[in-house]
Amino acid sequence: MKKTVLITGAGSGIGESIAKVYAGRGASLLLTGLVRDDLERVAQQCRQAGADTRVFPLDLEDTETIDALAAFVKEERIVPDIYVLNAGISQRAKAFDSTFEVDRKLMNVNFFGHVYLIKSLAWLIRQKSDVQIAVVTSISGLFGFPLRSAYCASKHALFGFFESLDLENPNIKVTFLIPGRIRTQISKSAILGDGGVYGKMDQGQEQGMDVDRCGRVAVRAIDKRKHRKLIGGKELLMAYIHKYSLRLFYTLAGKISST
């Protein structure tokens, strides 16, 4: 059956790659993100693949734009089967060197914005017998890591909220997509301790998994209704080391390059 998919952060990176996979299946897409030009570029490619595609600029820090999206969904009678909560920003600064405003921004974009979005559409989600929510977290959401304090916190928080939502609602199935190092621009747009932009491509990011491959793996995990799916390369070993040997994790984490 043809699916309707709402994707946040669809103008680039993992969100764009997931959109293209669903477009190839003929899904109906609602692409959201900060920059309309980026969304239109991705939407054009999706339309060329035969997908009915609409765009809606969205700032997850601004609840008014989220309200506007919810009103648009209602007015246009869009009923998503799958919500891909992908939008987010990263960080490159030590905890004590980051202002509280930076901490708040990371939580607002990565966590609170998506919580507000889902609650704004709760009336619609409750009407459907089967809804899937794919939450793009991060391997950094499984443990702390240098230069990522608030980023890690925001990704940790996603697990707590959306796992609870899954357990409370029989009609909702949540899949946590947990990428490691994926070749996207996320490091370039990461924010510094003073709120400035990092503006560089991390070496680890540049050598990461191809983003289109990541998108294909992500959609397969959603298809299979997996609870969690780690996506990446050898860096994913840290998730198992943290789980089974904290002593070794603390030894290694301080030695691994954070950039």
Image (cartoon, helix red, strand yellow):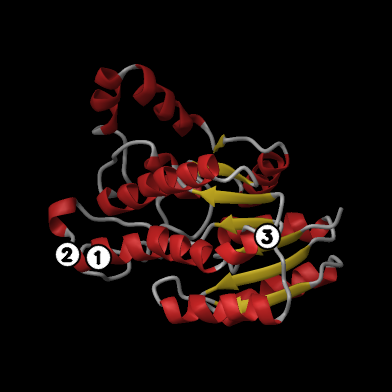
User: What amino acid is labelled 2 in the image?
Assistant: Thr
Residue 44: quarter of image: bottom right
Q: Quick check: 113 left or right of 230?
A: left
Residue where numbered disc 2 is placed: 99
Residue where numbered disc 3 is placed: 127
Of all residues, the one furthest to the left in this rendering is 96
Foreground mark, 3 or 2, reads 3
- Residue under the image location 31 percent in, 66 percent down: 105
Q: Say which mark, if any, is on residue 47.
A: none
Residue where numbered disc 1 is placed: 102
Circles 1 and 2: CB atoms closer than 8 Å: yes
Circles 1 and 3: CB atoms closer than 8 Å: no
User: First in sequence: mark 3 or mark 2?
Assistant: 2
Q: Eyeballing the image, is 124 above or below 39?
A: above
Circles 3 and 2: CB atoms closer than 8 Å: no
Residue 232: quarter of image: top right
Foreground mark, 1 or 3, reads 3
Return the x and y of residue 209 as percentages of the image width and height.
Answer: 57, 43
| Relative depth, front residue between 33 and 128 | 128
* Alpha-carbon span between mark 1 and mark 3: 37 Å
Q: Eyeballing the image, is 256 above or below 44?
A: above
